[in-house]
């Protein structure tokens, strides 16, 4: 008989030419010496060798080597590369693994399975290391793990650097465990955290290695003598508070013990000439808007869920929960310690409650589990780093917390200088904070940031110091000056670079405005007003209106100031952009009244022109014409070319809507010449767009119209003008429709509608729904078109935006053709009413689904 346990296969040992693979120990040796491949690489090699000469699917390898985990295929590629480098020790060994593109791999090298019982057992690991077996699995960091092991083949000193809580210790221990057989005399771990004196560092190592101090011989000399003939990896953990002692001992070991390798973990590097610094970043973050499957691939999410399942085993990643977990990971910056502490709260709180409580992260994320890292709270972790700073470093660290989303060196010097830190000192103190991993220097230029968890800690420290008001006021003043410097440049040749600059500083603008709401509403009003063009172009119209409304309410209404009149006009422009014409009219009229009171002719001309635009939007062309002509007279008296050009566009729109295309074209051309001279790309795009409409609707020159709309779209894409991009796509869609290119029309119109949905651009939505309905009528889907037209008609009524006369004629013909195609007015009217009864979101979802089905 085969025996009761015949189905239980013994772990295999394979000979691969000069290599031996022990599948139980997960060790690959070459000519008797261990190859630094690591357990994961050995697991991948085992899968391939056990199925030698057959292609193994990537999914099968991933399932076997990463059981129970969802990992990126990139991790498999990393391990395959590492295996090939290891096998290259044998002639032709790098070719023993073949790749089948996008499918899998095949092992084609020599393979011979041998009897495991005939192999002598390896030396017990306890005699070669003091590394403890971890009680939790190692999650993520596959790329870093592979890179560190590869680098250790050619360097004798590597320092893992980074802020506390990133998992430097855990990663170093995993490296040591996986490379144990690569060092003849083992791997030894030295915890330096308990030390208070740098002079005691050699004593800590001596205790681990059991080296005794002898009379008349320094302990460091004894250590060097002991290690002089040994091949070993020393892991020096938590070096930052005894940095000088670590550096001195390491330098001596590297000089006098030629086969010793040192791997250190520290907030900052040891600053030795032979050192290879390895900065450790937080875990890669998920996109909280992605689907559950994509979210599950994130290392940060995998760590959180695996630790959370220790407390709630049935925790799954269904769609809504996955997005909440992703948001937790993002809010905690992907810091492993923070994620483990948050995961421990799953035992007591639902996921959504944990997410809500993260505003008080330093109270929520405490831990008493013995399995958690040494720092049992986020605050303790950061206290450790903070206490290592000198007084000047502490001051700058606290002051930098007023920045949100990062800062430039110029901004830090302007905002944060002050006793005891001069402007010239800021850069040097900042360098020290970067070296100690409390500040991150971004790779793509002069910009720095803190992880949000670190920033919140620094902000708490600033609040405790009683100096928050001083530095937040400085922050507000700096960004007010920046916005007011940007304001005129957003209308000229430099507008693209300034739009990008304000986009980079958006979080700082928001932070400054938040502070100003209670502290200095007048400055806040000026800041929000100066950003008008930015709010409009980049799709932040509603946010801009919220800020301006808040500041106008908080700031004193008297005495009358130009700043208040300007803020009213900007708020009105935001209201007009959201199609709230009554509110826009009220605000513009108030701005006009204040401008007249102040005798501000620039403000009077601008307010008159803006009121003319609202009259135009509501179909009152005589009133619009009167307002614009009065405005134009003032602009000409002032010699203001920009005001003249904008008014010419507005007058062109009025005569265009009344059917005088020749006069409209002339006015547009005059405006375009001025705008090109001024270099205002956004205005140029607007005029090109309008000229395209003249070419299309009055001359029927569709190729010319398409060229003009495409030129306008290119400019708007370059500027990041989201409202303009959506408008150009709408016009290109109608041009394609008129040329009977219905596939292109559908693609452009649905892209436009998707953007308008995000922007809540109701005027744009009306145009896109009506244009898509025309495609439905042509395709014979009359009821679908009627629903879209029905909802568009309801929107027109709600916002008070009638058809221009020429457009009304075109639209009536479209509806008449739809009714004729259907041949049943009752059914058509019923579909129309169904569209009217939809909510805006229902109508948008219906239109996009209707047209996505046609591809």
Image (cartoon, rainbow, N blue to C red):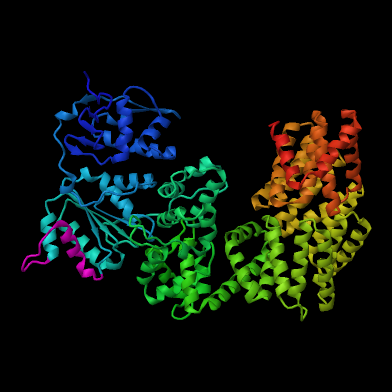
Against 182, residue 208 (above or below) is: below
- Quadrant in which the C terminus appears: top right
Q: Is residue 293 left or right of residue 204?
A: right
| Start-end of magenta stretch | 196-218
**Residue shown at the point (22%, 25%) measured from the top left:** 113
Residue 64 in the image: state x and y as whole percent.
Answer: 36, 33
The residue furthest right is 622
Task: Please say whether residue 695 is visible from this viewpoint.
Answer: no
The residue furthest left is 215
Residue drawn at 25 percent across, 63 percent down? 192
Q: Position of residue 325 (x, y in %)?
A: 51, 50
For residue 749, side relative to residue 792 (left or right): left
Does the magenta-highlighted stretch encompass residue 207?
yes
Numbered circles on residues, count: 0
Q: Is residue 826 magenta?
A: no
Q: Position of residue 358 (x, y in %)?
A: 51, 60
Q: Is residue 325 above or below residue 492?
A: above
Q: Toward the viewer: 844 or 586?
A: 844
């Amino acid at each position: 008989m085969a025996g009761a346990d015949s189905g239980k296969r013994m772990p295999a040992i394979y000979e691969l030419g000069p290599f031996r693979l022990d599948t139980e120990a997960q060790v690959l040796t070459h000519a008797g010496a261990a190859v630094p491949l690591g357990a994961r690489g050995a697991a991948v090699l085992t899968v391939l060798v056990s199925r030698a000469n057959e292609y193994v699917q990537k999914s099968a390898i991933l399932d076997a080597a990463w059981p129970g985990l969802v990992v990126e295929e990139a991790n498999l590629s990393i391990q395959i590369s590492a295996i090939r480098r290891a096998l290259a020790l044998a002639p032709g060994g790098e070719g023993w693994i073949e790749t089948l593109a996008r499918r899998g791999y095949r092992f084609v090298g020599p393979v011979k399975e041998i009897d495991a019982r005939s192999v002598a057992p390896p030396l017990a690991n306890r005699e070669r290391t003091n590394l403890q077996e971890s009680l939790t699995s190692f999650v993520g960091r596959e790329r870093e793990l592979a890179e560190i092991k590869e680098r250790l083949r050619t360097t004798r000193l590597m320092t893992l650097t980074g802020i506390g809580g990133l998992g430097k210790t855990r990663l170093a221990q995993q490296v040591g465990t996986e490379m144990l057989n690569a060092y003849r005399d083992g791997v030894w771990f030295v915890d330096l955290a308990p030390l208070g004196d740098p002079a005691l560092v050699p004593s800590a190592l001596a205790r681990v290695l059991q080296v005794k101090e002898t009379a008349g011989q320094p302990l460091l000399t004894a250590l060097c003598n002991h290690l002089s003939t040994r091949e070993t990896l020393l892991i020096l953990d938590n070096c930052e508070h005894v940095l000088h002692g670590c550096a001195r001992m390491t330098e001596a070991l590297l000089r006098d013990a030629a086969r010793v390798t040192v791997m250190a973990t520290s907030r900052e590097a040891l600053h030795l000439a032979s050192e290879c610094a390895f900065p450790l970043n937080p875990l890669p973050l998920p996109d909280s808007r992605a689907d559950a499957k994509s979210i599950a691939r994130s290392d940060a999410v995998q760590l959180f869920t695996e630790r959370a399942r220790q407390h709630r085993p049935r925790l799954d990643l269904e769609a809504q929960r996955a997005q909440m977990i992703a948001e937790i990971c993002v809010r905690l910056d992907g810091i492993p310690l923070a994620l483990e502490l948050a995961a421990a709260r799953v035992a007591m709180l639902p996921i959504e409650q944990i997410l809500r409580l993260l505003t008080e992260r330093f109270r929520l994320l405490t831990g008493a589990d013995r399995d958690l890292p040494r720092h049992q709270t986020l605050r303790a972790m950061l206290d450790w780093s903070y206490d290592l700073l000198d007084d000047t470093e502490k001051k700058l660290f606290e002051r930098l917390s007023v920045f949100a989303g990062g800062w430039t060196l110029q901004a830090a010097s302007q905002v944060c200088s002050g006793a005891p830190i001069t402007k010239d000192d800021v850069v040097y103190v900042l360098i020290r904070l970067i070296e100690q991993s409390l500040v991150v220097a971004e790779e793509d230029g002069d910009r720095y940031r803190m992880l949000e968890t670190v920033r919140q800690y620094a902000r708490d420290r600033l609040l405790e110091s009683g100096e928050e008001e001083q530095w937040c006021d400085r922050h507000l003043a700096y960004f007010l000056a920046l916005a007011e410097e940007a304001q005129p440049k957003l209308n000229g040749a430099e507008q693209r670079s300034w739009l990008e600059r304000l986009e980079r500083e958006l979080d700082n603008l928001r932070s400054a405005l938040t502070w100003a709401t209670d502290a200095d509403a007048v400055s806040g009003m000026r800041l929000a007003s100066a950003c008008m063009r930015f709010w409009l172009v980049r799709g932040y119209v509603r946010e801009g209106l919220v800020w301006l409304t808040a500041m106008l309410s908080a700031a004193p209404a008297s005495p009358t100031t130009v700043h208040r009149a300007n803020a009213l006009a900007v708020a009105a422009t935001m209201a007009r952009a959201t199609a709230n014409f009554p509110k826009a009219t009220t605000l513009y009229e108030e701005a006009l009244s204040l401008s007249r009171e102040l005798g501000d002719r620039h403000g009077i001309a601008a307010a008159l022109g803006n009121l003319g635009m609202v009259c135009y939007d509501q179909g009152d062309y005589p009133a619009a014409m009167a307002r614009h002509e009065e405005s134009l007279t003032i602009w000409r008296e002032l010699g203001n070319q920009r005001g003249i050009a904008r008014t010419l566009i507005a007058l062109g729109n009025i005569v265009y809507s009344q059917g005088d295309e020749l006069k409209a074209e002339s006015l547009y051309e005059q405006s375009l010449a001025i705008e090109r001279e001024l270099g205002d790309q956004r205005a140029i795009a607007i005029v090109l767009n309008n000229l395209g409409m003249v070419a299309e609707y009055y001359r029927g020159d569709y190729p010319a119209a398409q060229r003009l709309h495409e030129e306008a779209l290119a400019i708007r894409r370059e500027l990041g003008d989201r409202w303009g991009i959506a408008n150009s796509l709408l016009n290109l869609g109608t041009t394609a429709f008129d040329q009977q290119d219905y596939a292109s029309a559908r693609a452009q119109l649905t892209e436009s509608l998707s953007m308008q949905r995000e922007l809540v651009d109701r005027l744009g939505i009306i145009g896109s729904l009506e244009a898509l309905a025309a495609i439905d009528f042509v395709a014979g889907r009359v009821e679908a078109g009627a629903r879209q037209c029905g909802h568009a008609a309801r929107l027109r009524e709600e916002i008070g935006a009638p058809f221009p006369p020429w457009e009304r004629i075109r639209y009536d013909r479209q509806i008449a053709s739809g009714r004729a195609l259907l041949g049943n007015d009752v059914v058509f009217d019923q579909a129309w009413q169904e569209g009217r009864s939809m909510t805006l979101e229902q109508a948008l979802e219906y239109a996009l689904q209707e047209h996505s089905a046609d591809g």
